Amino acid sequence: MAEIADNGGGGHEKGGKKRPKKGSTRIDMTPMVDLGFLLLTFFVMTTTFSKPKVMSLVYPPKMDVPPTDLPKVNNGITFLLTKDKIFYYTGEFYGPGNKDGKPVTQLQETTFGPQGVRTLLAKLNSYVISNKKGLDSKFQAKSIDEKKYKDILNKLQTDKEALKVLIKTDDKATCENFVNLVDELEIAQVGVVAPVDLTVAELDLMKAKK
């Protein structure tokens, strides 16, 4: 609130003119401070803070002695990341002179373009993506709650028909490419992702491909 302080008037001396009284304005800012705190409290209580979006990754345990017989890879794809390049192969890896007599694994190259990783993952993980559409419809219709929705989706992503992804990098791979690949896996609803070490045979194959 504002108030005017009266300083008195002059001009009462003999022979002088009578001058009007002078006043000085003083503004009380106390109500403004209260209003500021009320607005601050309102915005703090009503603001919705953005939640960080993270993707869980499965890290295999470290072993002192690498196993000689690797587990079978069912419906899996392996990405090999190096500087500015992304290679991949599906299924199991077979190096030159493997004991099973299988043809040597051939690496394929892809990109982060429109017809690259996203299209590839959408095709390979169509089982989860197609089933998720029906699940989303049920959730939007409120026929299932959020907890049940997440439980069913998690079961879909870990089912044997769902795509499993291994990510391997060499010493020249960039962090940006790794993060971009993880983002694409999240978009494609891939539930099983495991960063693992690159083998010597895979590294040699990458060098030959480059």
Image: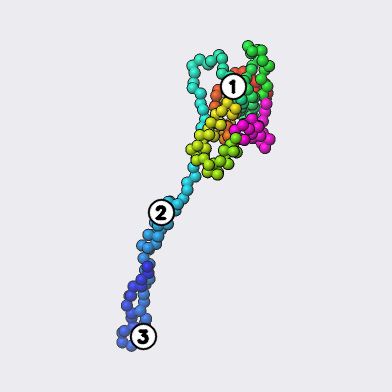
Residue 8: percent from the left, percent from the top? 32, 77
Check if residue 116 falls in the magenta segment: yes
Ranked by sequence position, the earlier of labels 3 and 2 is: 3
Residue 106: percent from the left, percent from the top? 68, 22
Of 8 and 26, nearer the camera is: 26
Circle 1 sits in a helix, a strand or a loop, which is it? Answer: loop
Left or right: residue 102 versus residue 6 is right
* Quadrant containing the C terminus in the rendered view: top right
Ranked by sequence position, the earlier of labels 1 and 3 is: 3
| Residue linked to disc 3 | 17
The residue stretch that appears in magenta: 108-130
Residue 41 image label: 2
Type of amino acid at the residue the image marks with label 1? Val
Q: Residue at x 37, y 81 (%)?
A: 20
Check if residue 78 falls in the magenta segment: no
**Label 1 packing within 10 angstroms: few (<14), some (14-19), many (20+):** some
Q: Residue at x 61, y 25 (%)?
A: 75
Asked if 90 appears above or below 129 in the picture, the reply is: above
Q: Residue at x 63, y 32 (%)?
A: 126
Of 66 and 205, nearer the camera is: 66
Distance Cα–Cα, label 3 vs label 2: 56 Å
Q: Are marks 1 and 3 in contact (CB under 8 Å)?
A: no
| Residue linked to disc 1 | 73
Q: Nearer the viewer, mark 2 or mark 1?
A: 1
Of 90 and 133, nearer the camera is: 133
Type of amino acid at the residue the image marks with label 3? Lys
Ranked by sequence position, the earlier of labels 2 and 1 is: 2
Of 71 and 37, nearer the camera is: 71
